[in-house]
Amino acid sequence: AQSVAQPEDQVNVAEGNPLTVKCTYSVSGNPYLFWYVQYPNRGLQFLLKYITGDNLVKGSYGFEAEFNKSQTSFHLKKPSALVSDSALYFCAVRDANSGYALNFGKGTSLLVTP
Amino acid sequence: NAGVTQTPKFRILKIGQSMTLQCTQDMNHNYMYWYRQDPGMGLKLIYYSVGAGITDKGEVPNGYNVSRSTTEDFPLRLELAAPSQTSVYFCASSSRAGIALAVQDTQYFGPGTRLTVL
């Protein structure tokens, strides 16, 4: 089965500092990996995805993610955090056996303090 | 484009009642999905559809039913509401038909329906 794990329930970072939200994956075959963000009482918004090609993927709002095959990781990063980045972040992997649905991690709550 | 819309936004049901959660997308996407989100659990797939007239079960289908009579609409039916169905429900859609690989599979989510069963 295709799955992802987010080892941190919460990440705290000061505004202006770099942030990393961790994700590891377990898949058979080539992974299709995604990051989504959820603001309070809102739906999920797409940030970025890895299909193939460059290991560094750039996405919306200044976020990027690094695909590392040897470590089976797909960590989300941003060079300088903003208070407005505070939200719930989900890593997900595509499951071709379920109509290409997404299997989500449990989510990581990011808190950026001024 | 409105994207993916869901109604209602909130609903309180009594045990045993039934209701339909509505989902509509205007992006001509062939794939549609229903997920439920429980605190600390991420999202779980309830049902999905790969096109009009075709639906299949996901990870947690018990207590739910779906239909897909048109490309745009994918309603989720709860027949006998139970407290375990208290959750936030999200509908999503994506496309895999005739477009570049880089665009495929990105799922677009609706704003969600918060359901409480008492």
Image (cartoon, helix red, strand yellow):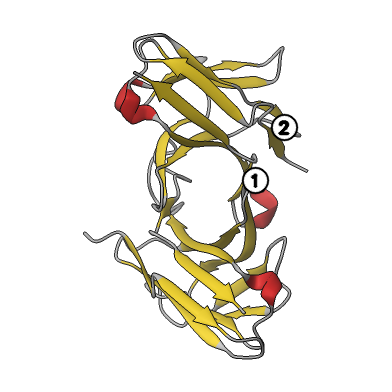
Report the mark closest to the observer, 2 or 1.
1
Residue A50 visible in rendering: no
**Quarter of the C terminus of chain A within the rendering:** top left
Describe residue A62's horizontal placement relative to residue B62 as left or right.
Answer: left
Q: Residue A93 versus residue A84: which sits nearer the camera?
A: A84
Q: Is residue A95 left or right of residue B95?
A: right
Residue A20, relative to residue A61: is it above or below?
Answer: above
The residue depicted at 65 percent of the width and 86 percent of the height is B15
Q: Nearer the viewer, residue B86 or B35?
A: B86
Which x, y percent locates residue B10? Answer: 42, 72
Query: Considering only vertical position in the picture, is A38 above or below A31?
Result: below
Instruction: Tell me which chain the residue with mark 1 is part of.
Output: B
Q: Residues within 10 Å of mark 1 (few under 14, many from 20)?
A: few
Give the quarter of the figure containing the N terminus of chain A.
top right
Work out which residue is located at the far left of the displayed protein and give it.
Answer: B1
For this view, does A15 lie left or right of residue A3? left
Where disc 1 sits, the SS reads loop
Distance Cα–Cα, label 2 vs label 1: 28 Å
The kind of residue tagged 1 is: Gly
Nearest the camera: B40 or A57?
B40
Identify residue type, mark 2: Gly
The label shown at residue B40 is 1
- Dot 2 corresponds to which residue? A29
Query: Which residue is found at the position 53% from the left and 62% from the top?
Result: B88
Expressed as whole percent of the image width and height from the top left, the position of residue A90 reads 54, 37
Callout 2: few (<14), some (14-19), or many (20+) C-alpha neighbours within 10 Å?
few
Residue sitting at the far front = A114
User: How many numbered marks have been drawn onto this rendered protein structure?
Assistant: 2
**Numbered disc 2: what chain?**
A
Marks 2 and 1 belong to one chain? no
